[in-house]
Amino acid sequence: MIKTGDARSLGVPASEARLNFDTELQELGGGPRRRLLMVDDEPAFELSFYCGTCPLLFRRLETAQEKLSLESMQERLAGKLDDPDDGGVIDAFGTLLPEGTYLPLLLEVEPRLVIPGREGDYFSGEQVTTWGIDQFWGLPEYPHTPYYRTFETAVDADAHLYEFVVPMVPPTWNERERVEEYVALMEQGTVPTAVAISTLDVCQPAIDRGDDYFVHWGLTHFLLDGHHKLEAAATAGRPVRLLSLLTLGESLAGAEDTARLPALRTQSRTARRIGR
Protein backbone atom coordinates (compact mmCIF):
# COMPACT_ATOMS: atom_id res chain seq x y z
CA MET A 1 0.00 0.00 0.00
CA ILE A 2 1.33 3.43 -0.98
CA LYS A 3 -1.60 5.64 -0.05
CA THR A 4 -5.39 5.57 0.40
CA GLY A 5 -7.57 8.44 -0.77
CA ASP A 6 -10.93 9.46 0.65
CA ALA A 7 -14.03 7.73 -0.67
CA ARG A 8 -15.61 9.97 -3.28
CA SER A 9 -18.40 10.24 -5.79
CA LEU A 10 -17.25 9.59 -9.34
CA GLY A 11 -18.68 8.64 -12.67
CA VAL A 12 -21.25 9.64 -15.23
CA PRO A 13 -24.85 8.50 -15.81
CA ALA A 14 -25.00 4.80 -16.65
CA SER A 15 -26.18 5.55 -20.18
CA GLU A 16 -22.94 7.49 -20.80
CA ALA A 17 -20.47 5.21 -18.98
CA ARG A 18 -18.36 2.76 -20.99
CA LEU A 19 -18.22 0.41 -18.01
CA ASN A 20 -21.22 -0.66 -15.94
CA PHE A 21 -22.36 -3.32 -13.48
CA ASP A 22 -25.59 -5.06 -14.33
CA THR A 23 -27.75 -8.13 -13.75
CA GLU A 24 -28.91 -10.09 -16.78
CA LEU A 25 -32.62 -10.33 -17.44
CA GLN A 26 -34.38 -13.36 -16.02
CA GLU A 27 -35.55 -15.79 -18.71
CA LEU A 28 -38.77 -17.68 -18.11
CA GLY A 29 -37.85 -20.94 -16.42
CA GLY A 30 -34.17 -19.99 -16.39
CA GLY A 31 -31.62 -20.27 -13.60
CA PRO A 32 -30.37 -17.53 -11.28
CA ARG A 33 -29.53 -14.20 -12.88
CA ARG A 34 -25.84 -13.49 -13.38
CA ARG A 35 -24.03 -10.48 -11.93
CA LEU A 36 -22.11 -8.88 -14.80
CA LEU A 37 -19.39 -6.36 -15.55
CA MET A 38 -20.39 -4.65 -18.81
CA VAL A 39 -18.14 -2.82 -21.29
CA ASP A 40 -19.76 -0.76 -24.04
CA ASP A 41 -23.11 -2.39 -23.21
CA GLU A 42 -21.73 -5.89 -23.77
CA PRO A 43 -21.25 -8.48 -20.97
CA ALA A 44 -17.49 -8.69 -20.36
CA PHE A 45 -17.20 -10.69 -17.11
CA GLU A 46 -19.48 -12.78 -14.97
CA LEU A 47 -18.83 -11.95 -11.31
CA SER A 48 -19.39 -13.67 -7.97
CA PHE A 49 -23.06 -14.44 -7.40
CA TYR A 50 -25.03 -12.12 -5.12
CA CYS A 51 -25.78 -14.75 -2.45
CA GLY A 52 -22.28 -14.53 -0.94
CA THR A 53 -22.19 -18.30 -0.40
CA CYS A 54 -21.21 -19.22 -3.97
CA PRO A 55 -17.52 -19.33 -4.93
CA LEU A 56 -15.61 -16.16 -5.79
CA LEU A 57 -15.70 -15.62 -9.54
CA PHE A 58 -14.45 -13.47 -12.41
CA ARG A 59 -15.21 -15.27 -15.67
CA ARG A 60 -14.36 -13.64 -18.99
CA LEU A 61 -17.16 -13.83 -21.55
CA GLU A 62 -16.95 -14.01 -25.33
CA THR A 63 -17.84 -10.34 -25.78
CA ALA A 64 -14.91 -9.10 -23.62
CA GLN A 65 -12.80 -7.60 -26.41
CA GLU A 66 -12.10 -3.99 -25.44
CA LYS A 67 -9.49 -2.16 -23.35
CA LEU A 68 -10.36 1.15 -21.70
CA SER A 69 -7.09 3.07 -21.66
CA LEU A 70 -7.07 6.85 -22.18
CA GLU A 71 -4.59 8.34 -24.62
CA SER A 72 -4.58 11.62 -22.67
CA MET A 73 -3.20 9.82 -19.59
CA GLN A 74 -0.45 7.77 -21.25
CA GLU A 75 2.40 10.17 -20.52
CA ARG A 76 1.32 10.72 -16.91
CA LEU A 77 1.09 6.98 -16.27
CA ALA A 78 4.43 6.15 -17.87
CA GLY A 79 6.02 6.78 -14.45
CA LYS A 80 4.89 6.16 -10.90
CA LEU A 81 2.18 8.07 -9.10
CA ASP A 82 3.00 9.08 -5.55
CA ASP A 83 -0.55 10.11 -4.68
CA PRO A 84 -3.92 8.92 -5.99
CA ASP A 85 -4.80 12.48 -7.01
CA ASP A 86 -1.62 13.13 -9.01
CA GLY A 87 -2.25 14.59 -12.45
CA GLY A 88 -6.03 14.31 -12.48
CA VAL A 89 -5.91 10.58 -13.20
CA ILE A 90 -8.91 9.73 -11.00
CA ASP A 91 -11.17 12.33 -12.60
CA ALA A 92 -10.06 11.30 -16.09
CA PHE A 93 -10.90 7.63 -15.57
CA GLY A 94 -14.03 8.57 -13.67
CA THR A 95 -15.56 9.57 -17.01
CA LEU A 96 -15.55 5.88 -18.00
CA LEU A 97 -17.35 4.67 -14.87
CA PRO A 98 -20.98 4.68 -13.70
CA GLU A 99 -22.00 7.10 -11.00
CA GLY A 100 -21.17 5.75 -7.57
CA THR A 101 -18.89 5.93 -4.55
CA TYR A 102 -15.31 4.77 -5.05
CA LEU A 103 -12.37 4.33 -2.67
CA PRO A 104 -9.00 5.13 -4.34
CA LEU A 105 -6.14 2.82 -3.34
CA LEU A 106 -2.61 3.37 -4.62
CA LEU A 107 -0.73 0.07 -4.46
CA GLU A 108 2.62 -1.29 -5.52
CA VAL A 109 2.36 -4.83 -6.84
CA GLU A 110 4.68 -7.48 -8.24
CA PRO A 111 2.37 -9.47 -10.51
CA ARG A 112 2.69 -13.17 -11.23
CA LEU A 113 0.92 -14.43 -14.36
CA VAL A 114 -1.33 -17.43 -13.73
CA ILE A 115 -2.82 -19.75 -16.32
CA PRO A 116 -6.08 -21.41 -15.19
CA GLY A 117 -5.60 -25.03 -14.24
CA ARG A 118 -1.85 -24.68 -13.82
CA GLU A 119 0.42 -24.03 -10.83
CA GLY A 120 -0.73 -21.18 -8.64
CA ASP A 121 -4.30 -21.09 -9.96
CA TYR A 122 -6.62 -19.93 -7.18
CA PHE A 123 -9.67 -21.59 -8.72
CA SER A 124 -8.19 -25.09 -8.81
CA GLY A 125 -6.23 -24.56 -5.59
CA GLU A 126 -7.42 -22.50 -2.63
CA GLN A 127 -11.01 -22.30 -3.81
CA VAL A 128 -11.34 -26.08 -4.12
CA THR A 129 -10.02 -26.57 -0.58
CA THR A 130 -13.07 -24.66 0.68
CA TRP A 131 -15.91 -25.28 -1.80
CA GLY A 132 -14.72 -28.52 -3.39
CA ILE A 133 -15.31 -28.95 -7.11
CA ASP A 134 -18.49 -27.84 -8.85
CA GLN A 135 -21.20 -30.38 -8.02
CA PHE A 136 -22.70 -30.30 -11.52
CA TRP A 137 -19.63 -30.13 -13.75
CA GLY A 138 -17.33 -32.11 -11.48
CA LEU A 139 -14.62 -29.50 -12.13
CA PRO A 140 -13.22 -26.38 -10.47
CA GLU A 141 -14.52 -22.96 -11.53
CA TYR A 142 -12.82 -21.75 -14.71
CA PRO A 143 -12.23 -18.01 -15.35
CA HIS A 144 -11.60 -18.29 -19.11
CA THR A 145 -8.67 -15.89 -18.86
CA PRO A 146 -5.08 -15.75 -17.64
CA TYR A 147 -4.80 -13.37 -14.68
CA TYR A 148 -2.23 -12.01 -12.24
CA ARG A 149 -1.85 -12.81 -8.56
CA THR A 150 -0.29 -10.03 -6.55
CA PHE A 151 -0.97 -10.34 -2.83
CA GLU A 152 -2.63 -12.34 -0.09
CA THR A 153 -2.81 -12.03 3.67
CA ALA A 154 -4.76 -13.26 6.68
CA VAL A 155 -7.85 -11.31 7.67
CA ASP A 156 -8.13 -13.40 10.83
CA ALA A 157 -8.03 -17.09 11.74
CA ASP A 158 -11.23 -17.74 9.77
CA ALA A 159 -10.76 -15.44 6.77
CA HIS A 160 -8.11 -14.75 4.13
CA LEU A 161 -7.67 -11.98 1.56
CA TYR A 162 -6.69 -12.83 -2.03
CA GLU A 163 -5.82 -10.14 -4.58
CA PHE A 164 -6.05 -10.52 -8.38
CA VAL A 165 -5.43 -8.29 -11.38
CA VAL A 166 -7.59 -9.26 -14.33
CA PRO A 167 -6.86 -8.01 -17.87
CA MET A 168 -9.83 -7.05 -20.01
CA VAL A 169 -8.24 -9.01 -22.87
CA PRO A 170 -5.66 -11.82 -22.54
CA PRO A 171 -1.91 -11.06 -22.56
CA THR A 172 -1.60 -12.87 -25.89
CA TRP A 173 -3.41 -9.88 -27.43
CA ASN A 174 -0.71 -7.46 -26.24
CA GLU A 175 1.73 -5.92 -28.70
CA ARG A 176 5.09 -7.66 -28.22
CA GLU A 177 7.15 -4.55 -28.95
CA ARG A 178 5.38 -2.50 -26.29
CA VAL A 179 5.81 -5.24 -23.69
CA GLU A 180 9.52 -5.43 -24.50
CA GLU A 181 9.85 -1.65 -24.25
CA TYR A 182 8.35 -1.71 -20.76
CA VAL A 183 10.58 -4.61 -19.74
CA ALA A 184 13.63 -2.57 -20.77
CA LEU A 185 12.40 0.52 -18.91
CA MET A 186 11.66 -1.46 -15.76
CA GLU A 187 15.10 -3.03 -15.80
CA GLN A 188 16.45 0.53 -15.79
CA GLY A 189 14.38 1.36 -12.69
CA THR A 190 11.19 2.82 -14.15
CA VAL A 191 8.03 2.03 -12.18
CA PRO A 192 4.98 2.78 -14.36
CA THR A 193 1.38 3.00 -13.15
CA ALA A 194 -1.69 0.99 -14.16
CA VAL A 195 -5.33 1.85 -13.39
CA ALA A 196 -8.17 -0.51 -12.48
CA ILE A 197 -11.74 -0.58 -11.29
CA SER A 198 -11.95 -3.01 -8.38
CA THR A 199 -14.44 -5.05 -6.40
CA LEU A 200 -14.19 -6.62 -2.96
CA ASP A 201 -16.30 -9.78 -2.75
CA VAL A 202 -16.55 -11.60 0.57
CA CYS A 203 -17.67 -15.21 0.06
CA GLN A 204 -18.25 -18.16 2.38
CA PRO A 205 -19.95 -21.47 1.51
CA ALA A 206 -23.20 -22.27 3.28
CA ILE A 207 -22.11 -25.91 3.72
CA ASP A 208 -18.67 -27.22 4.68
CA ARG A 209 -17.68 -29.55 1.83
CA GLY A 210 -13.96 -28.85 1.54
CA ASP A 211 -10.78 -29.45 3.50
CA ASP A 212 -10.50 -25.88 4.81
CA TYR A 213 -13.68 -23.97 5.67
CA PHE A 214 -13.05 -20.22 5.85
CA VAL A 215 -14.15 -16.87 4.40
CA HIS A 216 -12.56 -15.78 1.13
CA TRP A 217 -12.07 -12.05 0.59
CA GLY A 218 -11.47 -11.47 -3.13
CA LEU A 219 -9.99 -8.08 -4.08
CA THR A 220 -10.23 -8.11 -7.88
CA HIS A 221 -8.76 -5.33 -10.03
CA PHE A 222 -10.10 -5.17 -13.59
CA LEU A 223 -7.55 -3.33 -15.70
CA LEU A 224 -8.60 -0.09 -17.35
CA ASP A 225 -5.04 0.84 -18.32
CA GLY A 226 -1.81 -1.13 -18.03
CA HIS A 227 -2.15 -4.39 -19.96
CA HIS A 228 1.37 -4.16 -21.40
CA LYS A 229 2.80 -2.90 -18.09
CA LEU A 230 1.45 -5.83 -16.07
CA GLU A 231 2.77 -8.41 -18.51
CA ALA A 232 6.15 -6.67 -18.61
CA ALA A 233 6.33 -6.56 -14.81
CA ALA A 234 5.48 -10.27 -14.57
CA THR A 235 8.10 -11.07 -17.21
CA ALA A 236 10.84 -8.95 -15.61
CA GLY A 237 9.95 -9.67 -11.97
CA ARG A 238 9.56 -5.93 -11.34
CA PRO A 239 6.93 -3.86 -9.51
CA VAL A 240 4.30 -1.57 -10.97
CA ARG A 241 2.04 0.88 -9.22
CA LEU A 242 -1.69 0.25 -9.43
CA LEU A 243 -4.31 2.92 -8.89
CA SER A 244 -7.39 0.99 -7.83
CA LEU A 245 -10.82 2.62 -7.86
CA LEU A 246 -12.74 0.30 -5.53
CA THR A 247 -16.48 0.42 -6.11
CA LEU A 248 -18.25 0.46 -2.76
CA GLY A 249 -21.77 0.14 -4.12
CA GLU A 250 -21.11 -2.85 -6.39
CA SER A 251 -18.85 -4.94 -4.11
CA LEU A 252 -20.20 -7.89 -2.15
CA ALA A 253 -18.82 -6.55 1.12
CA GLY A 254 -20.20 -4.54 3.97
CA ALA A 255 -19.02 -1.12 5.06
CA GLU A 256 -17.04 -2.63 7.94
CA ASP A 257 -15.21 -4.94 5.54
CA THR A 258 -14.23 -2.21 3.08
CA ALA A 259 -13.14 -0.01 5.99
CA ARG A 260 -10.69 -2.74 7.06
CA LEU A 261 -9.21 -3.18 3.60
CA PRO A 262 -6.55 -0.40 3.64
CA ALA A 263 -5.07 -1.72 6.88
CA LEU A 264 -5.15 -5.32 5.62
CA ARG A 265 -3.34 -4.26 2.47
CA THR A 266 -0.43 -2.91 4.57
CA GLN A 267 0.16 -6.31 6.22
CA SER A 268 2.89 -8.70 5.19
CA ARG A 269 2.09 -11.15 2.44
CA THR A 270 1.20 -14.51 3.99
CA ALA A 271 -0.21 -17.68 2.42
CA ARG A 272 -2.96 -19.56 4.16
CA ARG A 273 -2.20 -22.87 5.78
CA ILE A 274 -4.98 -25.39 5.46
CA GLY A 275 -7.15 -25.34 8.54
CA ARG A 276 -5.52 -22.19 9.96
Image (spheres, helix red, strand yellow):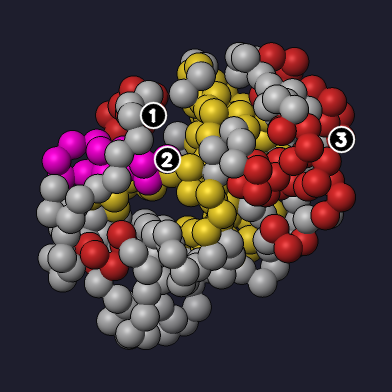
Q: Is residue 169 left or right of residue 204?
A: right
Amino acid type indicated by mark 1:
Arg
Residue 156, magenta (yes or no): yes
Q: Secondary structure at mark 3?
A: helix
Amino acid type at image mark 2: Phe
Residue 112 versus residue 186 in the image, above or below: below
The x and y percentages for residue 133 are: 29, 76
- Placement of 163 over or under 2, stated as above or below: below
Q: Earlier in the sequence, mark 3 or mark 2?
A: 3
Q: Report the magenta residues as a range.
A: 151-162
What is the x, y in percent for residue 208?
13, 65
Predominant SS of the magenta segment: strand
Q: CA distance from mark 3 to mark 2?
A: 29 Å
- Residue holding disc 1: 265
Q: Badge 2 is on which residue?
A: 151
- Residue visible at 54% across and 28% down? 108
Q: Position of residue 134 (x, y in %)?
A: 32, 77
Please tell me how crowded label 1 is: few (under 14), some (14-19), or many (20+) other residues with Cα within 10 Å: some
Vertical relation: 169 (above or below) 106: below
Label 3 packing within 10 angstroms: few (<14), some (14-19), many (20+)? few
